[in-house]
Image (cartoon, rainbow, N blue to C red):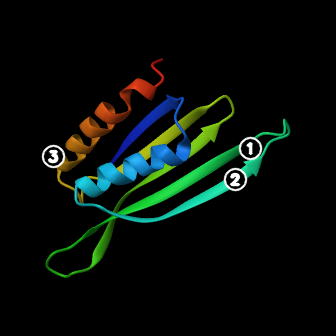
């Protein structure tokens, strides 16, 4: 089962948001892959970017890496960023997913847009 975490942040650079999530993932023992960033121009003359990052975990028995999650960040005009974080509970322990969510809230709560 995939756990999805959806959040909107204001006042934080999308690259910094991605780096913060990468750091939190590495603290939980996840391996972060390459960051993919795409930039799109808008009719208003501004740009919008999309950042994608995949997480893997190393299987200790087989030494193979298994994909266990991903993050997508879309920057919006006006300084907001939408985050979609997906973590695979069939690969990660529920405690690890819960701890990741708690760390994310602690580190980025002041930037989160509360609806």
Residue 107 is at least partly visible in this image: yes
Tell me which label, 3 or 2, sits earlier in the chain.
2
Whether residues under marks 1 and 2 lie with C-beta atoms below 8 angstroms apart, the answer is yes
Location of residue 104 by image quarter: top left
Question: Looking at the image, is 31 positioned above or below residue 98?
Answer: below
Horizontal placement of 77 versus 24: left or right? Answer: right
Badge 2 element: strand
Q: Position of residue 21 (x, y in %)?
A: 38, 48
At x 21%, y 81%, the residue is 63
Characterize the local packing of mark 2: few (<14), some (14-19) or many (20 or more) Cα atoms within 10 angstroms.
few
Q: Which residue is mark 1?
A: 47
Rounded to the nearest whole Å, what is the CA distance between mark 1 and mark 2? Answer: 7 Å
Rounded to the nearest whole Å, what is the CA distance between mark 1 and mark 3? Answer: 38 Å
Residue 1 is at least partly visible in this image: no
Identify the disc placed on residue 107: none
Q: Nearer the viewer, residue 93 or 80?
A: 80
Horizontal placement of 105 versus 79: left or right? Answer: left
Which circle, 3 or 2, is nearer the viewer? 2
Badge 1 element: strand
Q: Position of residue 19 (x, y in %)?
A: 43, 51
Characterize the local packing of mark 1: few (<14), some (14-19) or many (20 or more) Cα atoms within 10 angstroms.
few
Horizontal placement of 4 versus 83: left or right? Answer: left
Characterize the local packing of mark 3: few (<14), some (14-19) or many (20 or more) Cα atoms within 10 angstroms.
few
Q: Which residue is mark 3?
A: 95
Tell me which label, 1 or 3, sits earlier in the chain.
1
Identify the disc placed on residue 39: 2
Which circle, 1 or 3, is nearer the viewer? 1
Location of residue 6 by image quarter: top left
Badge 3 element: helix
Tell me which label, 1 or 2, sits earlier in the chain.
2
At x 22%, y 54%, the residue is 28
Rounded to the nearest whole Å, what is the CA distance between mark 3 and mark 2? Answer: 35 Å
């Amino acid at each position: 089962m995939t756990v999805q975490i959806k959040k909107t942040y204001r006042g934080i650079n999308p690259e910094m948001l991605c780096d913060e999530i990468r750091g939190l993932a590495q603290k939980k023992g996840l391996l972060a892959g390459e960051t993919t960033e795409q930039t799109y121009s808008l009719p208003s003359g501004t740009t919008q970017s999309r950042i994608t990052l995949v997480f893997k975990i190393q299987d200790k028995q087989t030494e193979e890496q298994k994909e266990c999650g991903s993050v997508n960040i879309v920057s919006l005009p006006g300084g907001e960023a939408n985050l979609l974080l997906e973590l695979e509970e069939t690969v990660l322990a529920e405690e690890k997913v819960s701890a990741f969510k708690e760390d994310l809230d602690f580190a980025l709560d002041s930037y989160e847009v509360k609806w």
